[in-house]
Image (cartoon, helix red, strand yellow):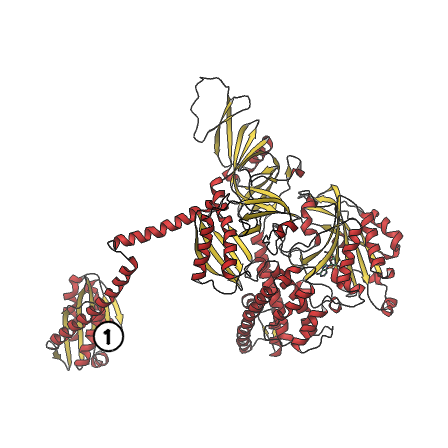
């Protein structure tokens, strides 16, 4: 059975059991603060388990691209060294959201493995949860009773909390699980040792293939468990391991999932793959594995970079490059050459790679070129380190140094060790580990934040319906809130039943605004929403308690003519349903946590209101990115694909794939088109709940790496110009954007350019600032017709004048020099000249001194000048005075400079000084005359 057939059978099987087959979510996790990459099939369904959303069906199945290279699941260092852990792998899964439970999950798993895939029953083992006293969870009798008649007691293993109890995170849904393991050893080996003894013992041929998780508890922040109202099934089967089992191989790398790529690596390196633990075979496995992770991550919108997820991808790519470099002698870019094979292999299941094949290959190639260069530099540095280490008489390279090479040059410890060994040195492995650990602790501390339990105030399934496309204000209620502690201090997160607040996503920044808490119509508090974020599908309003205000209220009966009192500033008046008016005034800024929580509980409704001016700016910027996107495709070509964006109130940023600098002419053309579209005042055509297939037919641009549901929102500004799938907020007509102006163009990373621009008020401010500069300039220049020409003329004139001045000054210095020659006297065998002169600059003074020295033998000279109010001195000494009288021009000038309140220095034969008191010049010269006589 080929791997494609194996995948197909899985999906068909669960479809026949009434499961809806869905697409894999992108590798890169979005809107999930706990995850950088999707690392399991269930990640995209979290909301359904948490009760924050409704699944598209109660039974779902798929194959999910997973990446386990960071956080809780990190298998990176095992990859290559074992034969069944990958960075990126496919996880086949079936789910029940509050529908079937253990019985069906277990029976179907068995049926699929033994009947469809025909795996031998006597090679399968299953595990059940043995229970945990501390958590007060009993042995999973239910699962045991289901398995026992199928596999028999002897094939059941009792697993502990570590292996057989699954948790989503520190808090949230969890429950016992049952794993299925397969024994792939030869008959002889099996005869020697029963497979049961090797389960969970890291044996490469006795491996876990499928994990069936039964979610039935919720873990609270205090660590306690409570039963979940709806129980769920979440299963995950490693596709590559399944292929190994079905195809009767001993390693995942021997299956047809990897053989295509390995063949290319063999060709490129000229070495055959032997499947051993030799370094060259390890390297081939590393490369065959990593190219998948890197290619699919890039296809899903990530680019290698120096931060966050982009950095993780860069490190994976570099790991592969250096394995190729060190063990396969691949010193030219080679990873890039594996992309086409991979793209074709997965064209059907994951078409996103094939669709962006050239882009992915180019990004990888550029990264390779850069890193191979770094490797070269690192090798040079390492040579030096080796020499130094030997010179110091040490037998191994210090751990700190190994760490530094790793951290700053991306030079991994094992490569350092390898090279060191070749040169007869070791490395201080412990010291390296220590430095590494310290760094990890540092970064963990930086990221530390903690969240309390959600406190539910209303039915939690009420969710947070977004009404912000149509309203800027809404009267609603708080569903739940929690307290979080992070770098910003204490914040509160609030979920509303419905909200006009747009939560940051798709590049558009979250709304800000106010929540007015009401109690029977009376305001009891006003909270500032400082940000709105998404956690999976939940909209979270972030509240800063130090900016919250409590209100004191008094009801004023509706008695016409009754006088109103005088109330404190910032008081607000509201009218109740019976017509009575309420005056409420703030009771001081900033609330303590418990005061705030009391207000949450006391209030029965909330008036949520966004900052509309800010939102209007954001909308203008967002719509402008759509116009920009189309204009870029018109001008640069259809290879332009959005790679990221920022849409805020102040500005917009748009990142897109393109391999060269956008020229000034191209930029001007793009800007012209966008502004033309603005002036066309195209009305917004917003369609919600469009079936995805129909949206694609409309020609809507979808972004790679974005997860779209079955129904999407389509934003159109002229069907022949801009049609995009988008959840953001937009202007009603492009005319509202007003004006679009670029503020910058540059490179973000290989193959990705960034454009920055401003619109509406931002563009107006920008233009005003620039025009103010020009008009000021005109005024200064006395309103010339052509400002630029006027400035150019000034510059030309200036340099001509400069030349004239220099010539005149030279002439003058010449004259002074000639005059001075007459004043030279002789004394004790040397010439003496002490004079006050009138020169234009310190340079001229110096020049004069040197010219005189050239004319007069054995000259001892002191010159003084007042240059634009600043006294200057220059002292020149003949060798005779330096040698015979041990004089030094530097010391002499310092001594003389005291007269002019200054200081200076120079060489023994020539020195200068400057000062602040010109009235002392004559005294200085008199003293000089005495000294040099
Ligand atoms: P293991 O103990 O082998 O690392 P796990 O307990 O981490 O597995 P789960 O988190 O239960 O695995 O994931 C479900 C299934 O996904 C596993 O049964 C296995 O078949 C597969 N799987 C897990 N990690 C990897 C990996 N790094 N590469 C390939 N397949 C994997
Ligand atoms: Mg694991």
Quarter of the image for the C terminus: give it: bottom left
Query: Can the viewer see residue 681?
Result: yes
Q: Is residue 671 left or right of residue 282?
A: left
Give the residue pinned by disc 1: 910
Note whether 808 is above or below 601 in the view shown. below
Location of the N terminus by quadrant is bottom right
Between 58 and 928, the one lying in front of the other is: 58
Q: Is residue 620 left or right of residue 16?
A: left
Q: Position of residue 634 (x, y in %)?
A: 51, 58
Which of these two is toward me, 351 or 732? Answer: 732
Compared with 511, 306 (above or below) is below
Q: Quadrant of residue 797?
A: bottom left
User: Total number of numbered labels?
Assistant: 1
Residue lying furthest left: 822
Image location of residue 30, percent across then percent down: 61, 52
In the depicted structure, whether residue 94 falls above or below residue 543? below
SS for tag 1? Answer: strand
- Left-right relation of 347 to 445: right
The image position of residue 90, as x and y in percent, is: 71, 59
Dot 1 beta carbon under 8 Å from ligand 1: no
């Amino acid at each position: 059975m080929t791997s494609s057939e194996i995948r197909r059978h899985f999906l068909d099987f669960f479809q026949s059991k009434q499961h809806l087959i869905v697409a894999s979510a992108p590798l890169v996790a979005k809107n999930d603060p706990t995850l950088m990459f999707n690392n399991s099939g269930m990640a995209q369904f979290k909301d359904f388990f948490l009760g924050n959303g409704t699944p598209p069906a109660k039974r779902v199945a798929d194959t999910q691209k997973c990446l386990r290279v960071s956080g809780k699941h990190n298998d990176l260092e095992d990859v290559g060294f074992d034969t069944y852990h990958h960075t990126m792998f496919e996880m086949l899964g079936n789910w029940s959201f509050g529908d079937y439970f253990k019985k069906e999950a277990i029976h179907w798993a068995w049926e699929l493995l033994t009947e469809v895939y025909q795996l031998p029953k006597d090679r399968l083992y299953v595990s059940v949860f043995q229970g945990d006293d501390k958590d007060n969870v009993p042995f999973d009798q239910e699962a045991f009773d289901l398995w026992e008649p199928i596999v028999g007691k002897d094939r059941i293993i009792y697993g502990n909390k570590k292996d057989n109890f699954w948790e989503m995170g520190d808090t949230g849904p969890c429950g016992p699980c049952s794993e299925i393991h397969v024994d792939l050893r030869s008959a002889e080996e099996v005869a020697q040792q029963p497979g049961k003894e090797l389960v969970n013992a890291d044996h490469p041929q006795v491996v876990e293939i499928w994990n069936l998780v039964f979610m039935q508890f919720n873990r609270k922040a205090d660590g306690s468990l409570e039963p979940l109202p709806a129980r769920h099934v979440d299963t995950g089967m490693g596709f590559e391991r399944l292929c190994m089992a079905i195809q009767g191989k001993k390693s995942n790398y021997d299956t047809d999932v990897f053989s295509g790529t390995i063949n290319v690596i063999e060709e490129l390196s000229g070495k055959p793959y032997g499947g051993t633990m030799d370094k060259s075979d390890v390297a081939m496995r590393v490369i065959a594995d990593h190219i998948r992770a890197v290619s699919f991550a890039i296809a899903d919108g990530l680019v290698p970079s120096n931060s966050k997820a982009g950095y993780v991808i860069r490190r994976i790519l570099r790991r592969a490059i250096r394995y190729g470099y060190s063990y396969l002698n691949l010193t030219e870019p080679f990873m890039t050459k594996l992309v086409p094979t991979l793209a074709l292999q997965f064209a059907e299941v994951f078409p996103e790679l094939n669709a962006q094949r050239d882009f992915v290959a180019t990004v990888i190639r550029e990264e390779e070129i850069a890193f191979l260069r770094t490797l070269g530099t690192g090798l040079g540095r390492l040579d030096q380190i080796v020499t130094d280490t030997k010179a110091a008489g040490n037998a191994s390279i210090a751990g700190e140094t190994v760490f530094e090479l790793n951290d700053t040059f991306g030079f991994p410890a094992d490569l350092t060790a390898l090279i060191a060994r070749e040169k007869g040195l070791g490395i201080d492995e412990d010291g390296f580990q220590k430095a590494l650990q310290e760094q990890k602790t540092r970064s963990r501390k930086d990221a530390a934040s903690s969240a309390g339990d959600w406190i539910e105030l209303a039915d939690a399934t009420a969710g947070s319906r977004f009404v912000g496309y149509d309203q800027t204000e809404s009267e609603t209620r708080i569903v739940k809130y929690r307290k979080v502690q992070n770098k910003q201090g204490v914040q509160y997160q609030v979920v509303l039943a419905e909200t006009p607040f747009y939560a940051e996503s798709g590049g558009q920044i979250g709304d800000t605004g106010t929540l007015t808490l009401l109690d029977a119509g009376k305001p009891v508090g006003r909270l500032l929403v400082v940000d709105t974020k998404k956690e999976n599908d939940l909209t979270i309003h972030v509240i800063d308690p130090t900016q919250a205000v409590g209100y004191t209220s008094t009801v004023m009966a509706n008695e016409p003519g009754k006088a109103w009192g005088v109330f404190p500033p910032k008081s607000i008046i509201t009218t109740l349903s019976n017509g009575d008016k309420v005056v409420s005034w703030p009771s001081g800024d900033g609330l303590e946590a418990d005061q705030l929580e009391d207000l949450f509980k006391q209030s029965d409704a909330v008036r949520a209101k966004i900052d509309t001016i800010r939102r209007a700016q954001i909308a203008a910027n967002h719509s402008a990115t759509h116009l920009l996107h189309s204009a870029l495709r018109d001008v640069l070509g259809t290879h332009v694909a959005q790679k990221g964006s920022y849409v805020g109130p102040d500005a917009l940023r748009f990142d897109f794939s393109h391999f060269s600098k956008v020229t000034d002419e191209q930029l001007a053309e793009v800007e012209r088109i966008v502004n033309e579209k603005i002036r066309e005042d195209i009305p917004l055509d917003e369609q919600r709940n469009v079936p995805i297939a129909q949206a694609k037919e409309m020609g809507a641009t979808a972004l790679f790496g974005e997860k779209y549901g079955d129904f999407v929102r389509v934003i159109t500004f002229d069907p022949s110009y801009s049609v995009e799938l988008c959840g953001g907020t937009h202007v009603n007509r492009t005319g509202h954007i007003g004006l679009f102006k670029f503020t910058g163009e540059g490179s973000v990373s290989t193959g990705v350019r960034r454009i920055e621009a401003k619109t509406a008020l931002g563009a107006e401010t920008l233009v005003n600032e620039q025009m103010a500069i020009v008009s000021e300039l005109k005024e200064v220049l006395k309103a010339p017709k052509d400002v630029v020409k006027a400035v150019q003329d000034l510059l030309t004139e200036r340099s001509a004048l400069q030349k004239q001045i220099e010539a005149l000054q030279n002439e003058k210095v010449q004259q002074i020099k000639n005059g001075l020659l007459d004043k030279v006297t002789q004394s004790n065998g040397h010439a003496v000249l002490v004079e006050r002169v009138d020169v234009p600059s310190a340079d001229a003074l110096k020049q004069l001194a040197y010219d005189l020295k050239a004319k007069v033998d054995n000259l001892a000279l002191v010159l003084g000048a007042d240059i634009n109010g600043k006294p200057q001195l220059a002292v020149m000494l003949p060798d005779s005075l330096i040698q015979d009288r041990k004089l030094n021009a530097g010391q002499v000038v310092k001594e003389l400079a005291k007269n002019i309140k200054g200081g200076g220095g120079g060489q023994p034969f020539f020195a200068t000084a400057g000062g602040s008191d010109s009235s002392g010049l004559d005294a200085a010269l008199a003293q000089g005359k005495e000294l040099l006589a």
